[in-house]
Image (cartoon, helix red, strand yellow):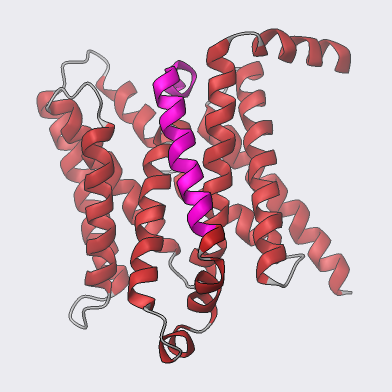
Amino acid sequence: MLVELFAKIAWYLQYPFVRYALIVGVLIALCSSLLGVTLVLKRFSFIGDGLSHTAFGAIAVASVLNLQNDMVFVLPATIVCAVLLLRTGKNAKIKGDAAVAMISVGALAVGYLLMHLFSTSSNLSGDVCGTLFGSTSILTLTRGEVWLCIVLSVLVVGFFLFFYHKIFAVTFDEDFARAGGTNTGAYNLLIAIIIAVIIVLAMNLAGSLLISALVIFPALSAMRVFKSFWSVTVCSAIVSVCCALIGMLAAILAGTPVGATIVVADIAAFAAFYLAGGMMAK
């Protein structure tokens, strides 16, 4: 049985589009897990949800404008919304959760309305469902899109490693970091922008409604077993990459939705780590 399974996987891997999908999936999982720990600890998880919904609206606008490369519009628009969410969330008149609700729900509504009014597709429901929950477009990536993902992923990983100590300080004690001369506002802004980049990259993989799971679940899983920031981050990255690989291979073999299958793998990993953490506490 296992021999047949590995033989089938090897047969699929001979096709470039499958290898491209696996490379992009692993890179997205790695990038999302690195900053996922920071988002959970800073209680910034809501930003991921808000930006994923915003990206849906941006994709709808890009499709209405008939842009051949929607990344040209979607990435800047999502980054601008990341800045707005961070700035608006600090406004005493509009609290962070209210700002997220306004921008994310508004983007979803406007995006669906635009797709309904101007769509030239005969399968609007399929297009919307694919954008929200992920589609098979992850299996139709071009070489250029793969290289773009590689370059952006290298920038994200480089940012995390180069500014690791600053991120650590801003994550655990922002007031102390500010008192020590760290420009906490700038680092929070950079984190929000990097998350926006990750979410745009992950749209084809998981869809706008499931992206937050790729960011949150690996971090929560690692926190059940490990306690230090570095060990949690490393464990989160390993769990995220493994779940992405398992989920994508399972989706290819079983013909299930890629994004949903990866999230189910993340849920299973969280359940395993939750039980392991409970046993270690005894």
Residue 36 visible in the shown view: no
Residue 105, x across and y down, in percent: 25, 52
152 sits left or right of 105 in the view: right
Q: Nearer the viewer, residue 37 or 168?
A: 168
Residue 109, x across and y down, in percent: 19, 44
Identify the residue shown where x is 55% and y is 38%: 27
Residue 180 included in the magenta stretch of the image: no
Quarter in which the N terminus is drawn = top right
Residue 241 visible in the shown view: yes
Q: Is residue 234 above or below residue 114?
A: below
Q: Is residue 203 above or below residue 120?
A: below
Q: Quarter of the image holding residue 223?
A: bottom right
Residue 153 included in the magenta stretch of the image: yes
Identify the residue shown where x is 38% and y is 27%: 130
Residue 126, x across and y down, in percent: 33, 22
Q: Specify start and end residues of the magenta stretch as a single range.
A: 135-160
Q: Quarter of the image holding residue 114?
A: top left
Q: Quarter of the image holding residue 277?
A: bottom right
Q: Nearer the viewer, residue 147 or 174?
A: 147
- Count the labels in the image: 0
Residue 152, x across and y down, in percent: 43, 41
Identify the residue shown where x is 30% and y is 29%: 128
Quarter in which the C terminus is drawn = bottom right
The majority secondary structure of the magenta stretch comes to helix
Identify the residue shown where x is 37% and y is 36%: 132
